[in-house]
Image: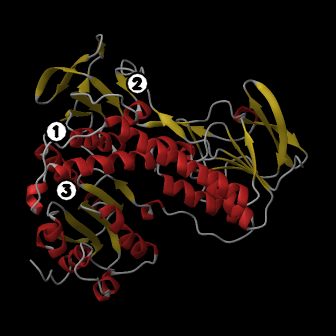
Amino acid sequence: MSDTFDLIVVGGGPGGYVAALRASQLGMSVAIVESTHFGGVCLNWGCIPTKALLRSSEIHHLLHDLNTFGFSAENVSFDLTKIVARSRGIARRMGGGIAHLLKKAKVTTFDGRAKLAGRAGEAHKVSITKDGAEVAVIKSPNVILATGARGRQLPGLETDGKLIWGAREAMTPTELPKRLLVIGSGAIGIEFASFYRNMGSEVTIAEVADRILIAEDPEISAAARKAFEKQGMKIITGAKVGPLQKGENEVSTTIESASGTIDLTVDRVICAVGIVGNVEDLGLEGTKVQVDRTHIVTDGFCRTAEPGIYAIGDVAGAPWLAHKASHEGILCVEKIAGRSPQPLHALNIPGCTYSRPQIASVGLSEEKAIAAGHKVRVGRFPFIANGKAVAMGETEGMVKTVFDATTGELLGAHMIGAEVTEMIQGYVIARTGELTEAELIETVFPHPTISETMHEATLAAFDGPLHI
């Protein structure tokens, strides 16, 4: 086996393995180094297994709402062990699929940890170790760092794997906690809160900011809070969580907010307070690579300050999304191959939260569009006025569009409701293709679909919607 490659990829997550596959398609000899499982956090401990859990929780919710659809059932129950096992089985299946794809593409795989180890002429050397012993040294003029990120640990709120959970423990419970505190209301925190509330847990969310889902348009954030509180969640914003006092099988704390101070005792705590990049032990100190607040600094083509070293995905900073990592992997490889890819436009990256109801967005919020100097036209359309949503029993939701009043440019789109994570791509295409309201208004949307709300929300920003 040769020890020299056209490209070495460090990390086999959604950024790394996609980069390796694309490089192989373009005729490069590729090596990929992964220390645990292909698919990274996303496939093994994030995106995929959480969606399996959320699907189970949605079914549990529907089983307790059967009368709405003309059905009845008795003694409805669930087996948490089977729910978790299904989720883990899906993750293993998808991981095996990635390994097969890499083998099919003739990508050379290495099991171990990679570290930059200087240069050999024009090539970068990468040392690979397993269980503390060096197993290989490989070389390439191009190295992509795709090492991902991990959950942030805050003093006094450290996870312990038993009472105070991170994402992994929250995905593999052995019993359902009756009382749960979720610290942090980003997508991760909200999805876990939604899963456990749907399954019957009493859920309290504590968020330090003045609203939940701070990355979303404030109007959507407010609608989400109203929906979650209607489901029985308790939400405390502007919250300061005191030290967690651990008992034998429960946790107590004090939460301060503008509404006052409360003493809270729960069975388990989930900490979802951000992430930090995996930049340690990569050999960066011997390079010109710059690190800013645990994330590697890159340009629009994923290049670092060290020639031949690239970084993609979570380790390269926000937004921390698997689809952003995959796109960066392709963009980066095509740049290395001498093609002419376009730099990634962060405002064209959709964000999705798979709670009940779902939340999705792309581009600028109304607030940020105005702050950026745009004169805006805003359209809104509620799900309750959409025939398909009514037929499905999913009337809770809305679509909001933000257009530039002068040019007709779609500045942003924000959605809450059933299946909006599937629908947002229509607006992403519009932004990527630089479409205006004229093209969106002329677009024929199929009937009956919930996607018709997207058309109506565009009409609402201009001449007015038709069905309300």
* Marks 1 and 2, the one that precedes in the sequence: 2
Judged from this view, the residue extending furthest toward the front is 74
- Separation of disc 1 and disc 3 at Cα? 19 Å
Query: Which picture quadrant has residue 416?
Result: bottom left
Mark identifier at residue 219: 3
Q: Is residue 347 left or right of residue 184?
A: right
* Marks 1 and 3, the one that precedes in the sequence: 3
Compared with 370, 222 (above or below) is: above
Q: Is residue 214 visible?
A: no
Q: Is residue 400 visible?
A: yes
The residue indicated by pointer 2 is: 154
Residue 173 x/y as whole percent: 36, 31
Mark 1 residue element: loop
- Separation of disc 2 and disc 3 at Cα? 30 Å
Judged from this view, the residue extending furthest toward the top is 248
Query: Which picture quadrant has residue 452?
Result: bottom left
Q: What's the residue type where badge 2 is placed?
A: Leu
The residue indicated by pointer 1 is: 233
Mark 2 residue element: loop
Q: What's the residue type where badge 3 is placed?
A: Glu
Residue 458 x/y as whole percent: 24, 77
Label 3 environment density (alpha carbons within 10 Å; few <14, some 14–19, many ≥20) = some
What is the quadrant of the C terminus in the image?
Answer: bottom left
Q: Is residue 48 left or right of residue 163?
A: right
Q: Nearer the viewer, residue 309 or 396?
A: 396
Numbered disc in front, either 1 or 3: 1
Q: Residue at x 21, y 34 (%)?
A: 201
Label 1 environment density (alpha carbons within 10 Å; few <14, some 14–19, many ≥20) = some
Q: Residue at x 74, y 30 (%)?
A: 130
* Marks 2 and 3, the one that precedes in the sequence: 2
Q: Residue at x 31, y 44 (%)?
A: 191
Query: Which picture quadrant has residue 335?
Result: bottom right
